[in-house]
Image (tube, rainbow, N blue to C red):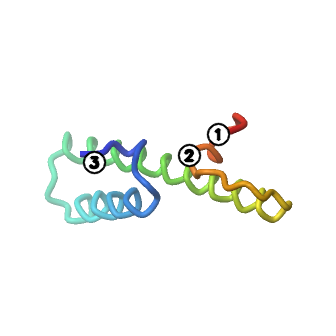
Amino acid sequence: MVSADEEGFDAVLLRLRKVVERLEAGNLSLEESLGAYEEGVGLTQRGHVLLDGAEKRVELLIAGGSQSVPLDEAATDDPP
């Protein structure tokens, strides 16, 4: 299984939806609920990183940058 840090936005969003469905079903123990919640928080953070990277990439393209920047590189402040 690929970790959330390696997944793309669509995969992260799908996993997050599944976590929410499990939590909303209401049949998890307290420990299972806490684990699912923690997983959801991590997925949410990864989703924000990917969206921030996409936003930076779009800003570079709008500013006239001609080079393509991978999303993971755009998500950091480090130059490619």
Residue at the outermost front position:
67
Q: CA distance from mark 3 to mark 1?
A: 27 Å
Q: Amino acid at mark 2?
A: Asp
Q: Residue at x 41, y 62 (%)?
A: 13
Q: Given contact means CB atoms under 8 Å apart, are the residues at marks 2 and 3 in contact?
A: no
Q: Is 3 or 21 nearer to us in this picture?
A: 3
Secondary element under disc 1, as helix, strand or loop, is loop
Mark nearer the N terminus (2 vs 3) = 3
Q: Given contact means CB atoms under 8 Å apart, are the residues at marks 2 and 1 in contact?
A: yes
User: How many numbered marks have been drawn onto this rendered protein structure?
Assistant: 3
Q: Disc 3 vs disc 1: which is toward the camera?
A: 1
Residue at the outermost right position:
63
Q: Residue at x 42, y 42 (%)?
A: 5
The residue to which callout 1 is attached is 76
The residue to which callout 2 is attached is 72
Left or right of residue 79, residue 47 in this image: left
Secondary element under disc 3, as helix, strand or loop, is helix
* Residue 38, picture quadrant: top left
* Residue 54, picture quadrant: bottom right
Q: Is 1 or 26 nearer to us in this picture?
A: 1
The residue to which callout 3 is attached is 36
Vertical order, 66 against 3 (above or below): below
Secondary element under disc 2, as helix, strand or loop, is helix
Q: Residue at x 26, y 58 (%)?
A: 23
Mark nearer the N terminus (3 vs 1) = 3
Q: Amino acid at mark 1?
A: Thr
Q: Residue at x 29, y 57 (%)?
A: 19
Q: Given contact means CB atoms under 8 Å apart, are the residues at marks 3 and 1 in contact?
A: no
Question: Split into 4 quadrants, where in the image is the C terminus?
Answer: top right
Q: CA distance from mark 2 to mark 1?
A: 7 Å
